Image (cartoon, grey):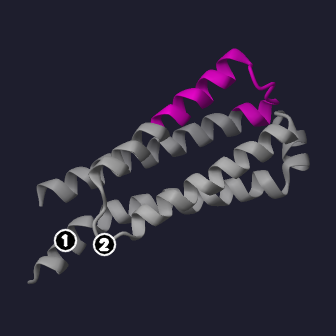
Amino acid sequence: MTAVSVTTDRLRFLRLALTADAVVTGGNGLVYLAFAGPVSGLLGPDAGLLRGIGVFLLVYGAAVGLLATRRTISPAATKAVIALNIIWTLGSVAAVVTGALDFTTIGAIWAIAQALTVAGFAELQIMGLRKARNH
């Protein structure tokens, strides 16, 4: 077994966790950007805000996707992704609890579901980083 195949094997889980995050995040961003009006009506926050979030999510998803494609995945960059995912999770919950974004009931449910998904990505990325270090 060569060093390259060992490295590739050790990074497989982390690469998959980052790729899943990138695809879901980018897809969500695309929907917010392309369909801001109807999504605003359904979820509650202003269409302009959703467009801004959409742009952010597209850029963030692309950056996470790029990280996932690197031959060697930077632990520091992965930790930054994990930290941003945790911040997004906490911010989503705070937005629902405080009523800051005027979510509809469906919007509040969506925001919490999204927060749980993003927290799940963070957990998978933590596990992937540990697997990459321990093997």
* Secondary structure at numbered mark 2: loop
Of all residues, the one furthest to the top in this rendering is 98
Q: Which residue is mark 2?
A: 71
Task: Identify which amino acid the numbered label 2 is placed on.
Answer: Arg
Q: Looking at the image, is 77 positioned above or below residue 115?
A: below
Nearer-N-terminus badge (2/1):
1
Q: Tell me residue 83's x, y (percent).
A: 41, 37
Q: Which residue is mark 1?
A: 7
Q: Nearer the viewer, mark 2 or mark 1?
A: 2
Q: State the image quarter where residue 67 is shown.
A: bottom left
* Left or right, residue 130 beside residue 84: left
Q: Tell me residue 109's x, y (percent).
A: 69, 35
Q: Looking at the image, is 21 positioned above or below residue 47?
A: below
Q: Tell me residue 15's x, y (percent).
A: 36, 65
Q: Looking at the image, is 22 positioned above or below residue 80?
A: below
Q: Tell me residue 122's x, y (percent).
A: 41, 44
Residue neighbourhood size for the residue with mark 1, other residues' Cα within 10 Å, grouped as few (<14), some (14–19), many (≥20) = some
Q: Which residues are magenta?
A: 86-108
Residue that appears at 24% across and 74% down? 8
For the residue pair 62 and 46, the one nearer the viewer reads as: 62
